[in-house]
Amino acid sequence: MNNDVRDALEPEQGVVFRKSSYSGENGQCAEVAPAADGGRWLRNSREPHKPALHYTAGEWDAFIRGVKDGEFD
């Protein structure tokens, strides 16, 4: 992933966001949803009515690899 600033976009119709079962109900969670192009949508659970960030499949895969490799610990 790069450090470019992203514009928030409106997800395609019918997108269903999920959050971790480990998340509390205090609204401080990131929610993720699959995108039609194979990427992922990411949004703030406190503001579900606002636009979301879109990541390509390659960007999302790199992020997941980084998490699994402990890159963000």
Image (tube, helix red, strand yellow):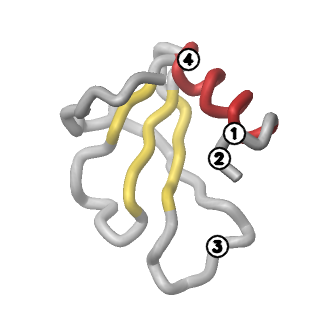
Q: Which residue is mark 1?
A: 71
Q: Which residue is mark 3?
A: 23
Q: Which residue is mark 4?
A: 57
Q: Amino acid at mark 1?
A: Glu
Q: Amino acid at mark 2?
A: Phe
Q: CA distance from mark 2 to mark 3?
A: 19 Å
Residue 49: x and y in percent read: 25, 60
Q: Which badge, 3 or 4, comes first in the chain's sequence? A: 3
Q: Which residue is mark 2?
A: 72
- Does residue 38 lie above or below 12 as drawn? above
| Badge nearest the viewer, 2 or 3 | 2
Q: Are marks 3 and 1 in contact (CB under 8 Å)?
A: no
- Does residue 17 lie above or below 6 as drawn? below
Badge 1: few (under 14), some or many (20 or more) residues near its Cα, within 10 Å? few
Q: CA distance from mark 3 to mark 4?
A: 24 Å
Q: Which badge, 4 or 2, comes first in the chain's sequence? A: 4
Q: Is residue 49 left or right of residue 55?
A: left
Q: Which badge, 4 or 1, comes first in the chain's sequence? A: 4
